[in-house]
Amino acid sequence: MLSEIIFYGSSVALISLGIMIVLTKRNLIKMIVGLSILDSGANLFLISIGYINGGTAPIMNENWSVVVDPVPQALVLTAIVIGVAVMAMALAIVVRIYEKFGTLDIRRIKELKW
Amino acid sequence: MVSPILIIAFSLFAAFFIAFFSKISKGIGRIVAFITVSVNLVISIYVIQNAMVKPILVFTGGFKPPFAINLAVDQLSAFLVLLVQILAFCMISYQMGKKGELPENKFYTLFILNVMGVSGMMMTGDIFNLFVFFEITAISSYGLVAIRKDKAALEGSMKYLIISSIGSSLFLIAIALIYGQLGTLNMADIAQKISMVNGSVLITAFLLIVSAFFIESEIFPFNGWAPDAYEGSNDTVTAMLSGFISKAGLYALLRLSFIVFGIGIKNSLFLTFGITTFIIAELSALRQTRLKRMLAYSSIGQMGLILAIMGIGTQQAVFAGIFQIFNHAFSKAILFLAFGYIFIHTGWREIEQFRGFGRKRPFLGALMSIAILNLLGFPIFAGFWSKIAILSEVGRNAKFLVLVFILFAAVVEVYYYFRFLKISYSAPVDDTAPKKTNFAVGISLTTMAVIVIAVGVYPSIITNFINSAAMALMDKAHYIQWVLGG
């Protein structure tokens, strides 16, 4: 019971922290760090759903009794890979933005404005 | 029997083939991309023929649903996939015709991946697979928007990336909530067991999904990225964003809310947000001086109109919405591609610079006029039938306030489009020499214009498909039955 509270509590904390960073920071690198934290929070939430206290890895042998749900683990692996791809894409664009604009401050990146 | 999974397999193969061989041959991208898109078009024609008789279920690994990952292609999916492939074919022809400065092989790799992601989103029957295809579409779109690597493109792409990544994380959380309650990821299985979900969890998951896909389908207030990404991106990419990437987000939203969740709150939610988007976007379009940004706001407004009409929730309303998806996709593809072609040759950006353009380049002027009149719903164009269907369905359900709002925004839309037409057909003041239109570009734009007029004159060639698609979207019990029982 305690472990569930820790897992769910910290995933909610990470998700809120990530969204807060993206919304309040003005530096592109910090915003991307926020996205990364948000992603980790979502992954932690997904993996906590399949977790059973005292469960072992879902490998079939003679002495297994309680195993955790393997599906969320497979999902989280996929989600982590996708998250890494998004981070790589974001950082590549940020490098280009720094080359062109000479700044990472979003208040000074205003090419498009109506 | 041609399996719809071939579209995904073949596109993935071709995309990485181009990436692998791009160092050896510079021209390989356009050839492979053209072949891939043509093959996809042929496959999707087979798929819609089969799906009209009986929905197609493809599953992997030898397990039946709900255990295996599956593709569930019903009439709605097949119709939209065919629409995407026709548009992709026209865009590839356009792209081959113009001499662009962008890195070609990278563009074609991303283009094919994007078309694959969109088709996958429309065909999958598994909610986590939907997330994966959604991310493939999104990541390749970030790359496509930024491909020109100038200031505007990078800024548009960055805004799109940040907002859309938040959306995909929200969607992942919603999947986790549903999985935690039901222990299944198959959409039909979730739909069957949805009444077992705790009420507050259901609403939370639904609202998370709605926010995630409102971002992708450019619904106010989640659409801050859209005008910038449209304006920053390259011509073909803008047509893709408007033509099918936003439609894929809308499709996922409709599939999840009509078939999987099926809760009543969706109707008023869609109606409110759709009408708000329609009015705000059209009023924003009115005050634009740049043509591309005006078209971008008009595109957002049309997405709002489609969402609002879906919110009425009757089968006729869904029919009208799908018809409007078809019209909007073709009209905006013509407009953005024609604008992009003119922009490359003249550098015109402001609406005022188009003064007299319709007289000097009558071919492109006529195509743009056809697209605009189709979008506004004039007779002999396909848009007429969808506008009629929308207005009569809103009237029949006695939603007169909605009718007033729709008519108001439509009048605004007519006003700024006619202002543009009037400028483009007034006496020429600028005398840059008119250039001839490239053959492939002309063919590609004319094909889309001919489709629009053909459907306008003989609407029966398409209403049959749209009717079955609307029926497929409304009939939840049938979806569950054919996925799980077949």
Image (cartoon, rainbow, N blue to C red):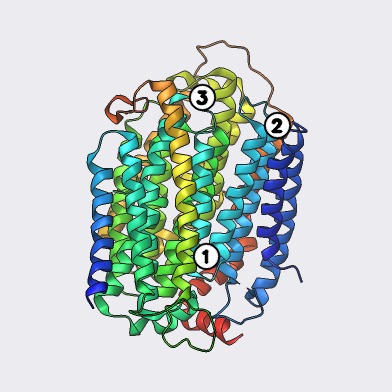
| Residue B345 picture location, percent across and down | 60, 20
| Residue B407 picture location, percent across and down | 33, 50
User: In the figure, is residue B209 to the left or right of B425?
Assistant: left
Tag 2–tag 3 contact (CB < 8 Å): no
Q: From the image, state whether disc 1 or disc 2 is nearer to you.
A: 1
Q: Quadrant of residue A28?
A: top left
Amino acid type indicated by mark 2: Gly
Per the image, the residue denoted by label 2 is B97
For the residue pair A62 and A4, the one nearer the viewer reads as: A62
Q: How many callouts does the rendering have?
A: 3
Asked if labels 1 and 3 share a chain, the reply is yes
Q: Secondary structure at mark 3?
A: helix
Sooner in the amino-acid sequence: mark 1 or mark 2? 2
Per the image, the residue denoted by label 1 is B129
Judge whether B290 appears above or below B469 on screen. above
Which corner quadrant holds the C terminus of chain B?
bottom right
Per the image, the residue denoted by label 3 is B425
Cα separation, mark 2 vs mark 3, equals 26 Å
Which corner quadrant holds the N terminus of chain B?
bottom right
Residue at left offset 60%, top offset 68%: B464
